[in-house]
Image (cartoon, grey):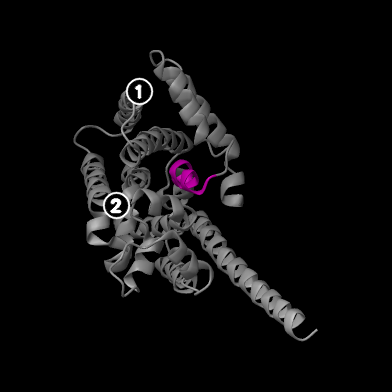
């Protein structure tokens, strides 16, 4: 995890700056905001999705050629943006509650902080704002239509759209140094990583997503191979994942993603290493499932022998 550990000091500084600003929010939003920021601080709590949100500016520093100061500002803006969009996700995925008022108010203050940092870097006429508009529009479309359009089955790279606004830090870095010819390639590279990251999240969250009806790529893959029109049950999903081997094609998709990422030759070694980390985590999960299955089968066979022949 050198792609993370080498930047821990820088990230600690960025989160310290963010927390200092959040502490100035009006009560009780400052207290709520600090707790929320701490929850997603990768220096304190390891979590895959938060790594890319915070570290992307550092990972693209080499191909973009931005300065240390620019890198820090982009990372800070991305932290505010990450917290804002996570709040939106929380609100959309939960039942209506009294806490919505504070969450939505906090989200808007975080959004203001993000825009404040970006305005220091990009004037109003900059192409940056057009890219930001596009990424957020894709995000809005993704969170609204992924279930209806069955993204993972019909066009799996579209599953990256929900996290698409994270790309603004990379695109912003390239705009700062006038390396716009790299934007499209790096957009595609980040989408590949975000897709695999979403796949890892979907495996981790499949029970919760099944219960609340949220779209989940793994469950969508299982459903696409069923002939029954009935609602997929938790037991049926467990059988597919842990007995019938549906994780194998799921893992193969992440491996194909890695091949495609390497073929882009983006000069973002740490982004590639991060994707390898996610892919290997999925592979290890699959291998563990298969190993457990073999032990259970062997154990069952030994039990059968002991009951019938010994």
Q: Is residue 51 magenta?
A: yes
**Extent of the magenta region:** 47-56
Tell me residue 54's x, y (percent). 47, 41
Label 2: element kind: helix
Q: Is residue 28 magenta?
A: no
Q: Residue at label 1?
A: 102
Q: Is residue 149 left or right of residue 30?
A: left
The mark tally for this picture is: 2
Q: Residue at label 2?
A: 180
Residue placed at 27% from the left, 67% from the top?
Answer: 154
Tell me residue 137's x, y (percent). 21, 46
- When the figure is inspected, residue 9 is found, relative to residue 160, above or below; the finding is above
Residue placed at 48% from the left, 37% from the top?
Answer: 68
Q: CA distance from mark 1 to mark 2?
A: 39 Å
Label 1: element kind: helix
Residue placed at 46% from the left, 47% from the top?
Answer: 49
- Residue lying furthest right: 310
- When the figure is inspected, residue 182 is found, relative to residue 127, above or below; the finding is below
Nearer mark to the viewer, of 1 and 2: 1
- When the figure is inspected, residue 206 is found, relative to residue 174, above or below; the finding is below
Residue 27 or 187: which is nearer the viewer?
A: 27
Residue 239 or 46: which is nearer the viewer?
A: 239
Residue 194 appears in the rendering: yes
């Amino acid at each position: 995890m050198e792609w993370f550990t080498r930047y821990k000091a820088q990230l600690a500084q960025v989160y310290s700056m963010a927390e200092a600003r959040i502490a100035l929010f009006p009560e009780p939003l400052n207290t709520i905001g600090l707790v929320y920021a701490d929850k997603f601080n990768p220096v304190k709590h390891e979590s895959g999705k938060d790594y890319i949100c915070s570290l992307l500016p550092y990972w693209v520093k080499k191909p973009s050629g931005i300065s240390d100061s620019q890198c820090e500002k982009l990372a800070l803006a991305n932290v505010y943006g990450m917290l804002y969009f996570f709040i939106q996700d929380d609100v959309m995925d939960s039942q209506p509650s009294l806490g919505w008022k504070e969450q939505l108010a906090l989200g808007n203050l975080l959004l203001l902080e993000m825009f404040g940092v970006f305005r220091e870097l990009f004037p109003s006429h900059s192409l940056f704002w057009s890219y930001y508009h596009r990424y957020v529009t894709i995000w809005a479309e993704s969170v609204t239509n992924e279930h209806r359009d069955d993204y993972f089955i019909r066009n799996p790279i579209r599953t990256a759209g929900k996290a698409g606004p994270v790309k603004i830090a990379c695109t912003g870095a390239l705009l700062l140094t006038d390396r716009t010819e790299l934007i499209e390639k790096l957009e595609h590279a980040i989408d590949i990583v975000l897709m695999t990251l979403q796949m890892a999240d979907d495996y981790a969250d499949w029970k919760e997503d099944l219960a609340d009806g949220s779209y989940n790529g793994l469950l969508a893959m299982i459903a696409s191979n069923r002939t029954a029109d009935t609602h997929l049950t938790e037991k049926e999903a467990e059988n597919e994942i842990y007995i019938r081997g549906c994780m194998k094609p799921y893992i193969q998709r992440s491996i194909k993603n890695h091949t495609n990422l390497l073929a882009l030759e983006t000069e973002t070694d740490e982004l590639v290493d991060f994707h390898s980390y996610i892919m290997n985590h999925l592979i290890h999960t699959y291998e563990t499932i298969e190993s457990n299955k073999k032990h259970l089968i062997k154990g069952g066979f030994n039990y059968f022998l002991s009951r019938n022949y010994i």
